[in-house]
Image: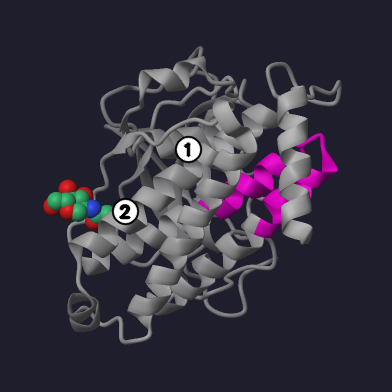
């Protein structure tokens, strides 16, 4: 009942095209819903493709014992339902599914990528929350966020990672999320360009160049593949800013061939996000130079929160 009411309220507000003064330029609730739908389409297609690619027996052989496969189907169903919920609410304004390229090639790499996507989904909803003007949308988005975070915990546990590696999740802003999502999007239907959307831009991408277990205090490599990131002048330092809910944690970035090295600070754990910046007082779309890169930090329990 509540669900149906909420959906009707959503649809009414979408058709009214509500825009409030609280929102930043170009940011509307309808745009945010389409941003959420963009991510849900990606996740939905990812799970449908993975379930079509790999059999239950192959998941078991890869170490994911039952009921993992059934739970994966449940997750896939959840994502499909999120897509239809948002699409119904948005009506003609809803963006359509794009075509994607996922780098997973077997059950193991599929589950690893699922974990990354769920983590990004959680950070995306969390980061969008403060920009949502209408409270009815906020509850709807929150009810998706909590489910995505349970997906994330379940999959992390299946990968022998801590299901809840830190007391706070990291919020990502629209462009930071889009930068990560854009890496999987090959092309979108031309009809999407006419739909109300946030003014999204992708930053130059940054890839983690360090393999194996990563802990706070460790030096890692951040690769700027295909481009050279330089500050305005050689006296301006570049920082690696690790995003947290209480603000970025800065770490000096040292230029090397093909990118930078930096030391993973205390205060991050689990799926963490790092951007490159030449500014040490704030991280906004105007100060991010490149990234985020995703860094899985595996500090010993209890986490390092100095
Ligand atoms: C499914 O298999 C195809 C063909 O090998 C591959 O291109 C695609 O990335 C796979 N998708 C997933 C989600 O693993």
Specify few, some or many for label 2: CA neighbours under 10 Å numbering under 14, 14-19, or 20 or more.
some
Residue 181 in the image: x percent, y percent? 42, 39
Q: Secondary structure at mark 1?
A: strand
Separation (CA) of disc 2 from disc 1: 15 Å
Q: Which comes before the other along the chain, label 2 or label 1? A: 2
Residue in front for this viewpoint, 158 or 56: 56
- Tag count in the figure? 2
Q: Which residue is mark 2?
A: 210
Q: Residue furthest bottom?
A: 66
Prevailing secondary structure class for the magenta stretch in the rendered image: helix
Q: Secondary structure at mark 2?
A: loop
Q: Which mark is residue 253?
A: 1
Residue 171 in the image: x percent, y percent? 65, 47
Locate residue 262: give its quadrant. Answer: top left
| Residue stretch in magenta | 121-143
- The vertical placement of 303 against 6, above or below, is below
* Residue 118 in view of the camera: yes
- The vertical placement of 35 against 62, above or below, is above
């Amino acid at each position: 009942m509540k669900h149906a009411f909420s959906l009707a309220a959503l649809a009414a507000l979408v058709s009214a095209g509500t825009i409030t003064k609280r929102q930043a330029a170009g940011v509307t609730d309808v745009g945010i819903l389409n941003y959420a739908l963009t991510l849900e389409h990606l996740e939905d297609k990812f799970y449908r493709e993975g379930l079509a690619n790999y059999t239950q027996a192959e998941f078991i052989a890869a170490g994911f014992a039952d009921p993992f496969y059934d739970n994966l189907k449940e997750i896939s169903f959840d994502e499909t339902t999120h897509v239809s919920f948002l699409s119904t609410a948005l009506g003609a304004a809803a963006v359509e599914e794009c075509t994607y390229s996922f780098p997973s090639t077997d059950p193991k790499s599929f589950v690893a990528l699922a974990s990354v996507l769920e983590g990004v989904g959680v950070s995306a909803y969390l980061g969008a929350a403060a920009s949502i003007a209408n409270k009815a949308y906020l509850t709807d988005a929150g009810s998706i966020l909590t489910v995505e975070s349970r997906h994330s915990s379940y999959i992390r546990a299946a990968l022998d990672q801590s299901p809840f590696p830190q007391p706070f999740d990291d919020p990502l802003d629209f462009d930071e999320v889009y930068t990560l999502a854009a890496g999987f999007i090959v092309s979108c239907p031309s009809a999407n360009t006419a739909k109300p959307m946030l003014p999204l831009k992708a930053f130059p991408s940054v890839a983690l160049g360090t393999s194996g277990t990563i802990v706070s205090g460790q030096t890692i490599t951040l690769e700027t593949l295909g481009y050279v990131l330089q500050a305005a002048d050689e006296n301006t330092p570049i920082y690696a800013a690790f995003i947290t809910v209480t603000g970025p944690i800065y770490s000096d970035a040292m230029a090397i061939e093909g990118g930078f090295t930096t030391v993973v600070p205390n205060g991050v754990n689990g799926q963490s996000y790092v951007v490159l910046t030449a500014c040490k007082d704030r991280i906004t779309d105007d100060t991010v130079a490149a990234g985020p890169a995703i860094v899985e930090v595996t500090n010993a329990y209890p986490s390092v929160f100095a």
